[in-house]
Image: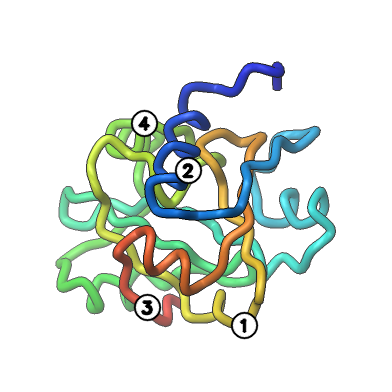
Amino acid sequence: MAEKLHPNVVRVQEALRAHAVTGEVVVLDEAAPTAAAAAAQLGCEVGAIANSLIFDADGAPLLVLTSGAHRVNTDLIARLVGAAKVRRATPEFVREHTGQPIGGVAPVGHPAPVRTLVDTWLGKHDVVWAAAGHPHTVFPTSYDELLRITGGTAAEVE
């Protein structure tokens, strides 16, 4: 990535500052479209990566911040949010509701707030890494901070 930060990353940084987050955005040498790729570059456990997954819940966006060690059970989260159907969102749906590409969706910095579930498993890690608006960027945070900055709901998602 060039020295100048992508506009998505700038928006995420601004949102993080507005929420008094002290962790700084880190630009990775290579894209990290998966939790395993991010963990390898950061030298941490895959479970300490907060995957930002956007789902289509009856036509509304739903962000699930899940441990990189987990798979989301869509039937379970449909029951949790009271949706008839929850399915993986298309890349177009993700961009429409977050302004960010799959593989780089941050927990914040979207055009409008997105309903969010935060995997309780992330609470097992002192430091959690989340995407920062682009596949080459992440930032350090914590489970409690993710709940605070997203207004999210703690949930078991697997």
Vertical relation: 20 (above or below) 28: below
Label drawn at residue 105: 2
Vertical relation: 115 (above or below) 28: below
* Residue that mark 1 sits on: 124
Q: CA distance from mark 3 to mark 1?
A: 13 Å
* Residue that mark 3 sits on: 154
Whether tag 3 and tag 2 are in contact, CB under 8 A, the answer is no
| Left or right of 97, for residue 133 | right
Label drawn at residue 21: none
Q: CA distance from mark 3 to mark 4?
A: 24 Å
Q: CA distance from mark 2 to mark 1?
A: 22 Å
Give the image quarter of residue 117. bottom left
* Residue that mark 4 sits on: 99
Categorize mark 2 by other alpha carbons within 10 Å: few (<14), some (14-19), many (20+). Answer: many
> At 81% across and 48% down in the image, what residue appears?
41
Comes first in the chain, label 3 or label 2: 2
Residue 145 in percent (x, y) is at 47, 67
Q: How is the image coloured?
A: rainbow
> At 65% across and 49% down in the image, what residue appears?
34
Whether tag 4 and tag 2 are in contact, CB under 8 A, the answer is no
